[in-house]
Amino acid sequence: MEHTYRLVISCPDRVGIVAKVSNFLSTYNGWITE
């Protein structure tokens, strides 16, 4: 069974945030979609 989750993040804009989040999702076979 496939699960869908929504991750909402609110934080100050800093260099590397997107890289860290996408790396975390990749580690757990996650996807980023629009």
Image (cartoon, helix red, strand yellow):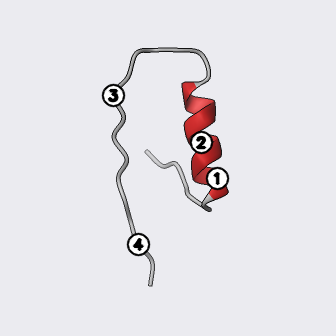
Kindly report the distance in space between the C-alpha atoms of the residues bearing marks 1 and 2: 6 Å
Q: Give the answer, above or below, for where 23 lies relative to 10.
A: below
Marks 1/2 in contact by CB < 8 Å: the verdict is yes
Q: Give the answer, above or below, for where 27 lies relative to 20.
A: below
Kindly report the distance in space between the C-alpha atoms of the residues bearing marks 4 and 3: 23 Å
Q: Image point 65% across, 43% down: which residue?
A: 23
Secondary structure under the numbered disc 2 in the rendered image: helix
| Marked residue nearer the N-terminal end (2 or 3) | 3
Pointer 2 local density, CA inside 10 Å: few below 14, some 14–19, many at least 20: some
Q: Amino acid at mark 2?
A: Ser
| Marked residue nearer the N-terminal end (1 or 3) | 3
Q: Is residue 34 left or right of residue 6?
A: right
* Residue 19 pos. (x, y %): 63, 32
| Marked residue nearer the N-terminal end (1 or 4) | 4
Q: Amino acid at mark 1?
A: Ser
Secondary structure under the numbered disc 1 in the rendered image: helix
Q: Image point 57% across, 51% down: which residue?
A: 25
Q: Disc 2 designates what residue?
A: 22
Pointer 3 local density, CA inside 10 Å: few below 14, some 14–19, many at least 20: few
Residue 10 is labelled as 3
Marks 4/3 in contact by CB < 8 Å: the verdict is no
Q: Disc 1 designates what residue?
A: 26
Q: Quadrant of the N terminus?
A: bottom left
Secondary structure under the numbered disc 3 in the rendered image: loop
Q: Image point 37% across, 60% down: which residue?
A: 5
* Residue 2 pos. (x, y %): 45, 77
| Marked residue nearer the N-terminal end (4 or 3) | 4
